[in-house]
Image (cartoon, rainbow, N blue to C red):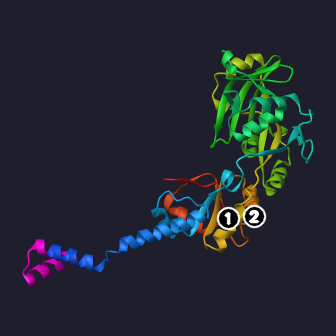
Amino acid sequence: MTTIWAVNRFINLFGVSTFNAVLQGLDLITIALPPALPATVTFGLVYAIKRLQKKRILVTRANAVTTSAWLDVLCFDKTGTLTEEGLDVKGVLPCVNGAFESRGFVRNDGKYSEDLVRLMASCHALSRIDGEIVGDEVDLKMFELSEWKLENSEQSDKAVLQVSDEDGNLVNVLRAFDFKSELARMSVIAQWETGCSIFTKGAPEMVASKCQKSTVPRDLHLVLDQYAEQGYRVLALAQRSLMDADLSEAMIQPRSRIEKNLSFVGIVILENRLKPDTSSVLRELNLDAKVRTVMVTGDHPRTALSVARQCGIFQTAKVGLCGCFQPIQAKKVSALLRASALCLGYVIGTK
């Protein structure tokens, strides 16, 4: 309203038309903004892009250079960003009669139970494309640990997946429940010549909640915390045997009725190493660029803390936030990131 009043006042005082008033206004703007300013800004951007290229930073949009100058917090995902893409299997801790066999790492030395080997060989979503096995990295590492072979399931009318051991004994996966982040587990119904079972793997807390209490080790949480503090990722394994009469019913039952009354059979310990340049890059961002770094992950809190300490993100003065995968409002994200060095288990939502 003030601008309109000033324009009307200008027209009335000097007796000029609206058209001439607009032209004179544009003329003033042109005088206030030097003609060389756009060229100077462009030259500055080109110079900045050249400097970034010397540091092996590729710029695909010039306006990103000016935007990045305003950044004061950078968020990083853990797996595949701060750490390597691949995973290494450190070992398996079998569970017998509700107790772990050993606290130490156990290698694939042929001493695993048959159910444990069958579970690792069949509970996955791997497939063969052009002769190469492809799929999730965790599934692939566990399958390699079993030392079984992935067969061509297209020749079977009933099986969605077929695997075999070195003697040629087949295990047919008749039904598969894919991994879902909200359930943190996957399951399959597998059948072989002498039996049939439901195999499940996933987050230890979620899998243990679906098992009979008598089969879950009492020191499970203690063991999980020990490995998590060392930065390891842990998966739990469980199974339930089916009788022939139960198989036909299990093929039509909902997932909620399938994944219950399981027996806890062990845990798999996986290692996800830091990338070689992670610590140096984060140190440069914190000290040289004065940019705070935050790690956002859905992993076990102790695992996240261990990795954050290794790479230098986590400081004792900072606070780690623990959530339960509850959606949060996008406007609250800024406050969360500025208040902590770790954001654990939070999902950005619109609620």
Single out the residue that lies furthest toward the left.
15
Residue 24, placed above or below residue 338: below
Q: From the viewer's perspective, is 93 left or right of 303?
A: right
Residue that badge 1 annotates? 281
Magenta stretch bounds: 1-20
Residue at image coords 56%, 68%: 51
Single out the residue that lies furthest toward the bottom.
13
Residue that badge 2 annotates? 309
Residue 263 seen from this side: no
Residue at image coords 60%, 55%: 346
**Is residue 9 within the magenta segment?**
yes
Q: Are marks 2 and 1 in contact (CB under 8 Å)?
A: no
The front one of 73 and 187 is 73
The front one of 65 and 168 is 65
Please tell me whether the stretch drawn in magenta is mainly helix, strand or loop: helix
Q: Amino acid at mark 2?
A: Arg
Q: Secondary structure at mark 2?
A: helix
Q: Position of residue 112 (x, y in %)?
A: 89, 33
**Is residue 4 within the magenta segment?**
yes
Q: Amino acid at mark 1?
A: Val
Of the numbered discs 2 and 1, the one sitting upstream in the chain is 1
Residue 304 seen from this side: yes
Residue 189, placed above or below residue 80: above
Q: From the viewer's perspective, is 8 left or right of 257?
A: left
Q: Position of residue 351 (x, y in %)?
A: 49, 53
Q: Secondary structure at mark 1?
A: helix
Residue 168, placed above or below residue 89: above
Q: From the viewer's perspective, is 111 left or right of 309?
A: right
2 vs 1, front mark: 1
